[in-house]
Image (cartoon, rainbow, N blue to C red):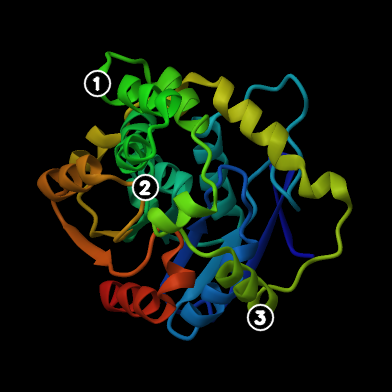
Amino acid sequence: MPYVTVERKKIYYEEYGVENKQTIVYFHGGPGESCLTYMHQAKLLSENFHIIIFDQYGVFRSDEIPQNTPFGITDHVKLIEKMRVELNINSWTPLGHSYGGMLALLYSFTYPNSVDKIIYDCPMWSVLSTSKAIASALLPYYKEHNQTKEIQICEEILYYNILPRDAFDKAMELELDDEMCRYCHVIDKSVYEKYIINYIPQPNLPEKDWIKYIHFTKMLFEKEDFYINYLPLLSEINKPSLLMVGEYDMTCGEEEQKYFCEHTANGTFVVLKNSAHLSWIQMPEKYTSTIIEFMK
């Protein structure tokens, strides 16, 4: 398997396309998901671009973060920049999905000379804003079904003066059953499973690699830099930026969409109809064509 070693840390990556084309580097979400589910989309985009996908440090096939070693989003950003140097890539376009959108924003702000353009795919730029977006989407359902406990949680997130960490913890208490998923237009499990079966070969890896994300998220959620509001950084970035949001996405809500449109100097905003958080699975042709059009 291909690895790049950065600061004695082995990072798993895959490369598609040819090097003399524009490079897009994919920052996966989760947090802790891995780049596996994006493999098919990477192959499609490689017909036009040079694509790098990788498992973030501490996830899946990359080295595990040692116990009792604090490692937050700022540390990941620094490591990614050193990875770019090791891969001998002059500059690239970060494509950040969900939590990866937070990485892409902070990376692009910190290392502007390493960035050509930026693509945000249903990003989470502010833990508090995302928690409010989730609560706002779910509250009407809970009221319709008289779910008192869940109504109270949503209202505390939306209407109380709440800290980002507390809001995020409360939002994570709101579990989605099948009926709620249909109400919120979350991707159907059968559609997701069919996509995985058809397009994503499952690697034969030990169980310890599959569950690395547990320690990864624990480390991430313990660091204060995860709870910073990164939205103001958008106004500090002048590189061409694309925001793609699924019509029913609950991660990048109206507040963040509006902020992007009003504060990004060189921004393009696209809503992908009939999709939610996983637009590249639900609307793959539109997803691919939107990126190609923006890059060209």
For label 1, the crowd category at 10 Å Cα-Cα, with few meaning under 14, some 14 to 19 and many 20 or more, is few
Q: Residue at x 45, y 61 (%)?
A: 90
Circle on res. 250: 2
Mark 1 sits on what residue? 159
Judged from the image, the secondary structure of the residue bearing numbered disc 2 is loop
Q: Position of residue 68 (x, y in %)?
A: 74, 19
* 10 lies left or right of 268: right
Give the answer, above or below, for where 101 lies relative to 267. Answer: above
Q: Earlier in the sequence, mark 1 or mark 3?
A: 1
Judged from the image, the secondary structure of the residue bearing numbered disc 3 is helix
Viewer-proximal residue among 271 and 229 = 271
Viewer-proximal residue among 188 and 228 = 188
Q: Earlier in the sequence, mark 2 or mark 1?
A: 1
Mark 3 sits on what residue? 198
Q: Earlier in the sequence, mark 3 or mark 2?
A: 3
State which mark lies toward you, 1 or 3.
Answer: 1
